Amino acid sequence: MLDKKYNPQESEQKWLAYWNDNNIYKFTPDDRQVYSLDAPPPTISGMPHIGHLFSYAQADMVARFKRLSGYNVFYPFGFDDNGLPSERLVEKEQGKKAADIGREAFNKLCYDTTNVYEAKYKDIFGRLGLSSDWTKAFKTVSPESIKISQLSFLDLVEKGYAYRKESPALWCNECLTSIAQAELETKTIKTTFNYVNFSVKETGELFTIATTRPELLPAIVCVFVNPKDKAHKHLIGKTAHIPVVEVDVPIMADDKVAIDKGTGVVMCCTFGDQTDIEWWKKYNLPLKHIFTDNGRIIDSVPKYGGMKIKEARRQIVEDLKEGGYIVKIEDLEHEVQTHERCGLEVEYTVMSQWFIDIMNHKKDFLKKGDEIKWYPSHMHARYNEWVKNIAWDWCISRQRYFGVPFPVWYCKKCGKPIFARKEDLPVNPLVDKPHGKCSCGCSEFVPDTDVMDTWATSSCTPLLNMRYGEKDNYEKILRPMSLRTNASEIIRTWDFYTIVKSFYHFNERPWDNVMISGYITDSNGQKLSKSKGNSKVEPTELLNTQSADVVRYWAGSGRLGTDIMFSEDTLLRGRKLVNKIFNVSKFIEMHLADYEDKPFEDFEYVDKWILGCFDQMQKSFVKYLNDYEVGLALNVLEKFFWNFCDNYIEIVKHRLYRPEEFGQKPRYSGQKTVYTLLYKLLQDFSIYFPFITEEIYQNIYHGRSVHLTKLEPLKHSYKNEKQNGDLMVEIISYARGEKTNANVTLKTPIKNLVLYVCPELRKAIEKSIKDFKATLFIENLTLSNTDEGYKIEKVELDLQ
RNA sequence: GGGAGAUUAGCUCAGCUGGAAGAGCAUCUGCCUUACAAGCAGGCGGUCGUAGGUUCGAGCCCUACAUCUCCCACCA
């Protein structure tokens, strides 16, 4: 028996335990077709926010739909707990930098800290009702994951897609590591545009250069002008003298210089930006690297050596002013590249690092992208845009501690790398020794002290899921996986890198489908994020005050890929819906006390009408879900459900209550209808509300779990009753309106109802005459004929 | 500057391959009706961002513009 009132907090705990104890979501391969989800392992960089609930709940809805559709659903959960995000969390909590704590101690802190947070994540996502197989949960920093990441790396080395090179790289002075292009974030900052006079050594002529980075004056290796620039082309071939630092550099020509930008003369430093690197390579310019790894000017630079970058900037401007070289200084707001993990401006450095080839295979990555179905489809354009515009190979070396180590040592004598043997993985080169000698005969080695980029590991999630390289693996069933789910911000990282790896390892797409969710925005329409501090409600608080089912209602509303506002209104709507589901179930349960399910087809007219409505709804419900449109599917389901409650139940209740008046068979027809439809409604709603539907299902249908049932269409589509049934409801609605307008209760009898109806509608009403009269409390009904539709001639209320 | 999306009722959002503008919230009016007052029945409320175009017919298709959001590129 269902309780008088539903207690979500109690019930949700109960079913969580039940699902867990009975392995309801456990994945075991069998003869069913597998549907596999590659859901994002959340980055462990702090507590999750409600945006996480949103996108993970949507993925779960798909998993649940596929399970109900008869697939054997593979839906593991993972934690992305290695790399910079976790390191920064620990540094923040400790109030110390990794380098000050020391590698070993720091790594231990990272393990401990991420464990604590993972338990919290697991608790929150569990409570949200994710139907994940937690026994298949993975961590990207576990020995198994390290092994697979290293194996993946070695495979790329073998195939020639990973290479080590001394090369310019993006460098973060705050995190003390190199980073990849995908980790950049643009930020608008206020700065100054400094117009500085340089002179031509040969003629003494002055010309002006505009720069936002005067501290780079000591790093200038060349000055460029556009060969078509009439004002400056005569400078080409001459020598520029740089004031203050007193250095001479050549003046050269390049088409890339924009004549109308700044002064039309550009200083080329090593390195101030991407173009500098291009020119440096193109013209084989000398290298003047003037920054230290922690953001200072190197000591060998006279006067400015040892200063912090910004300090040096101020000082150089001062010195330029003093020497009379500054023409003017303008305030400027412009966009700079910052590191997404810390928000600080990035610099460039030159060092030996591991790269994965991106630039030579862009076309292949685009092609693989074309083979994947993107939902919503315009997200494909975002992917294409990123791949087309990417300018660097993927630098995967990070000069950090907590992550997957490179299974590589370098020969002390000749510097040649020696790789770990695959059978020895996972290895830690700092502890383990390589197998054998270098080809030069030397047997002394230096370990690679770097760790891999976070994305180098998380791009392995399909590999982790299939247990790549293991004997007893899932390659057969998970190549490719069915669905990747994530928010749009990581298309360029997680999605892209996963495609890269899948292409290099298997020459195939990693998944058949990608489902991209939108963002949660605050009441001003701005994306919720920790850095903006506009995420006010905590997930736990939300789940406690609203119940998981209601939170999921909110998460499941709206169109796929569309941003959604955090809205109390939507939560209220969810609360009402969940409440209604419980109440109508209670009503139905009450009328099923003596019900015995047996084959029966001779339904009453109104019963066929509602069955037909359901059938029609169910078709579009399934269609939407097959397109991953969980929100639109919920819309049609919800609409049907309220029609079921407010119209059908109101009609059938008289028949259910009073068999002596209506007869046993019509009552059974009603019972069979509500029994059948409630079951199907519970199935449909179970995708969104796994808890309350289980509660009701267990009380009325007594199966193992509603989540292990199978969606099946009705035997018939009951199309014939749809149109005239709808018209009858219209008439009922009109008559109710008359009662409401008269300020009387809906139980007020109608003394006389006079209708003109078309022949088809007349038949319908006559077939359901008892239901019709009972619903409106009609004492006398007069039906007259008309050609088309109906006309309500008279509604005479009994106002006694 | 490049790419993507959005713009529909006071608010939050649906609106399918073009065919008489929808829901919830809010607001107003009734109603304790043998599941539900966290309910039920009704009412008010919209030049579908602007301007053109295609069409018998446009919220939907095309063009331009405006505003907002997201992603990218711009450190000269």
Image (spheres, rainbow, N blue to C red):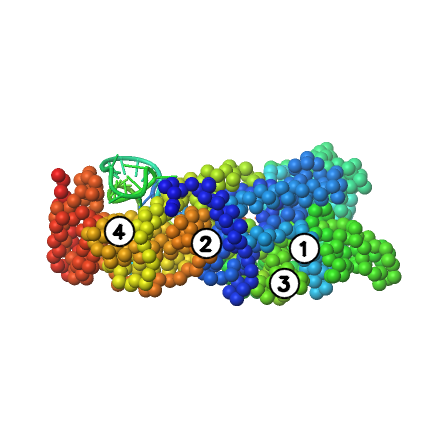
Mark 4 is surrounded, within 10 Å at the Cα level, by few (under 14), some (14 to 19) or many (20 or more) other residues, namely: many
> What residue is shown with label 3?
A473
* Rendered image quadrant of residue A618: bottom left
Write down the residue under mark 4.
A656
Q: Which of the marked residues, 1 or 2, is nearer the chain's N terminus?
A: 1
Q: Residue at x 78, y 38 (%)?
A: A305
| Residue at horizontal 42 percent and vertical 48 percent from the top | A695
- At x 43%, y 55%, the residue is A703
Disc nearer the start of the sequence (4/1)? 1
N-terminal of the pair, mark 3 or mark 2, is: 3
Q: Which of marks 3 and 2 is in front?
A: 2
Find residue A199 and report its horizontal and vertical position in percent. 73, 44
Chain letter of the residue carrying label 2: A
Give the structural element (helix, strand or loop) at label 3: loop
Residue that badge 1 annotates: A144
In the picture, measured across the screen, residue A534 lies left or right of residue A797, that is right
Disc 4 element? helix
Residue A233: x and y in percent read: 67, 52
Amino acid under disc 4:
Leu
